[in-house]
Image: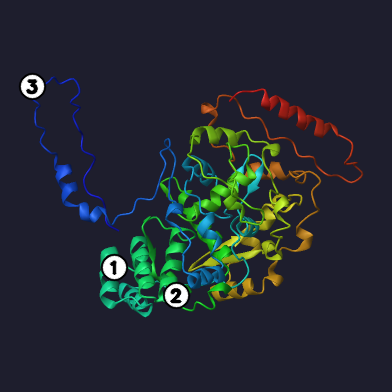
């Protein structure tokens, strides 16, 4: 990655100088001279759009403006067959730094779940499938770490000249290629009608701008090119599961206090937040959205207006009624629920792996939340080859029906004692007690389903929950 040199030059305003009055000549600064000499370098450096925000926010990346559907019909058919087509129009061109930062700091590293005063929530395979329309069934993959020479050989096997491959790996100083270079390779192959090579360059650029965004902001690992070596079988990859695992890994890293940047597919995280927390900010729906498209496309990108402190306060005082636990009901006729979304085992992407734990977020599946067991006790880490086999035969690794619990009557339901247990294993408040304007209200008490209790008659506990909502709304934070 090439680093920009020089800083911003400071100019001197000349307003108010009368005619004929001498104007003092300002000598160029050293940084200005350096910047002038390095203009040819800066033309090669890409700066993805970022938004200014307050302290405590993460730097986030989005490449939504760089994605355009190819004009060649042959390549468009290849993209559609790969299962990655929905990423082109579904990637947001703006990401709210404060919004994703406020959730990232609540992410638990072992379970990849967000800890809120109302319990745990997380991004599941069902969220990925519905929001992105990426395939969640198929095979997982593991990729080797390539040396620079191995990366050069892989590029040459994909119809890149040895001279260009060597020059690019020398510029990136490793087994990486720049996204801007991939666009040049694509255009060159289109002109020469090397359509398969153009398709591989386009696909590598596509995943580098979306599901496999890294912290460099401008490059992608060459090893991902292995996935597109055979254009006929790449459609068998569970791209949705790979995107989810990669985002889990980036959330784990970004949740550390000394991390200042979040990689991964932030469009998925932002869309998940806006669908489940519709009152957290004003949401605009795209007028071009048509039923049946991925739900990411229904959200119109907007310029961020909030700050992280206000979102932290909102989440610290959130109640059950502020959350849509199952937001995809109206989308089910176009995109049904897949049984694999109950998958209860590990998913992997490359050499990293994370557990998929639906038992910790049963309310997102429409079931009453119970107290989950420790993932370490229930899911010992299997060998990588076993993980691939488990996912291919996912029917044998679904969460047992006896552990799913009954279907909810009220979307926020959990068993008696769940919140007491959760408060003993978690710290769901971010704002310290000394910094809170008001002491946070407890979340709306859940309506516990007990035998012999009629669900049609309001119970005293339910009436208390309504009173808490009224009291909460009357307070100003």
Left or right: residue 173 versus residue 422 is left
Nearer to the camera, 372 or 150:
150
Please, what secondary structure does the residue beneath circle 3 have?
Answer: loop
Mark 3, residue position: 20
Q: Name the image quarter holding residue 144.
A: bottom left
Q: Is residue 103 left or right of residue 370?
A: left
Among numbered discs 1 and 2, the one appearing first in the sequence? 1
Image coords of residue 400 (percent x, y) = 75, 64
Q: Position of residue 90 (x, y in %)?
A: 54, 55
Q: Along the line of sight, which residue is nearer the eye, 385 or 349?
A: 349
Find out whether the residues at labels 1 and 2 contact each other: C-beta distance under 8 Å. no
- Rendering coords of residue 94 (x, y %): 47, 46
Q: Residue at x 44, y 76 (%)?
A: 196
> Quadrant where the N terminus lies?
bottom left
Determine if residue 121 is in view.
yes
Q: Badge 1: few (under 14), some or many (20 or more) residues near its Cα, within 10 Å? A: some
Viewer-side label of 1, 3? 3
Instruction: Tell me what residue is drawn at x 48 percent, y 73 percent.
Output: 227
> Considering only order in the chain, which callout, 3 or 1, is on the residue closer to the N terminus?
3
Count of numbered circles in the view: 3
Which residue is under mark 2? 226
**Gap between marks 2 and 3, in whole Å?**
69 Å
Kindly indicate the quadrant of the structure image that contains residue 464.
top right
Q: CA distance from mark 1 to mark 2?
A: 18 Å
Q: Earlier in the sequence, mark 2 or mark 3?
A: 3
């Amino acid at each position: 990655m090439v680093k920009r040199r020089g800083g911003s030059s400071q100019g001197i305003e000349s307003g108010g100088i009368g005619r004929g009055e001498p104007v003092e000549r300002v000598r160029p600064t050293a940084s200005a001279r350096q910047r002038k000499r390095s203009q040819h370098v800066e033309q090669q450096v890409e700066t993805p759009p970022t938004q200014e925000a307050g302290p405590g926010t993460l730097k986030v990346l989005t490449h939504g403006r760089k994605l355009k559907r190819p004009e060649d019909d042959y390549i468009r058919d290849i993209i559609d067959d790969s299962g990655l087509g929905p990423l082109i129009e579904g990637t947001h061109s703006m990401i709210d730094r404060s919004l994703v930062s406020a959730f990232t700091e609540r992410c638990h590293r072992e379970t990849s779940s967000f800890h809120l005063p109302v319990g745990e929530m997380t991004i599941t395979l069902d969220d990925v499938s519905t929001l992105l329309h990426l395939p969640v069934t198929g095979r997982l993959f593991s990729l080797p770490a390539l040396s620079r020479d191995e990366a050069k050989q892989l590029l040459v096997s994909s119809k890149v000249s040895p001279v260009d491959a060597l020059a690019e790996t020398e510029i990136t100083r490793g087994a990486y290629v720049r996204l801007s270079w991939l666009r040049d390779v694509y255009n060159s192959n289109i002109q020469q009608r090397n359509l398969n090579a153009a398709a591989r360059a386009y696909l590598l650029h596509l995943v580098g701008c979306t599901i496999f965004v890294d912290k460099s902001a401008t490059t992608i690992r060459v090893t991902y090119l292995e996935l597109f070596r055979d254009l006929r079988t790449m459609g068998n990859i569970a791209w949705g599961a790979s995107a989810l695992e990669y985002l889990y890994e980036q959330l784990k890293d970004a949740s550390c206090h000394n991390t200042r940047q979040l990689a991964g597919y932030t469009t998925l995280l932002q869309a998940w937040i806006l669908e489940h927390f519709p009152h957290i900010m004003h949401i605009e729906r795209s007028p071009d959205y048509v039923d049946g498209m991925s739900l990411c496309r229904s959200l119109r990108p907007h310029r961020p207006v909030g700050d992280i402190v206000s979102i932290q306060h909102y989440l610290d005082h959130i109640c059950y009624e502020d959350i849509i636990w199952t937001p995809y009901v109206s989308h089910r006729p176009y995109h049904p629920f897949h049984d694999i979304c109950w998958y209860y085992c590990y998913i992997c992407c490359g050499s990293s792996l994370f557990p998929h734990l639906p038992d910790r977020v049963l309310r997102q599946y429409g079931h009453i939340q119970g107290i989950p067991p420790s993932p370490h006790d229930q899911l010992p880490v299997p060998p990588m080859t076993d993980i691939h086999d488990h996912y291919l035969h996912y029917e044998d690794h679904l969460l047992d029906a006896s552990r799913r619990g009954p279907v909810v009557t009220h979307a926020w339901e959990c068993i008696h004692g769940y919140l007491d247990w959760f408060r003993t294993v978690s710290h769901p408040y971010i704002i310290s007690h000394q910094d809170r304007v008001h002491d946070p209200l407890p979340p709306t008490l859940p309506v516990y389903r007990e035998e012999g209790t009629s669900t049609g008659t309001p119970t005293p506990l339910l009436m208390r929950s309504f009173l808490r909502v009224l009291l909460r709304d009357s307070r100003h934070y």
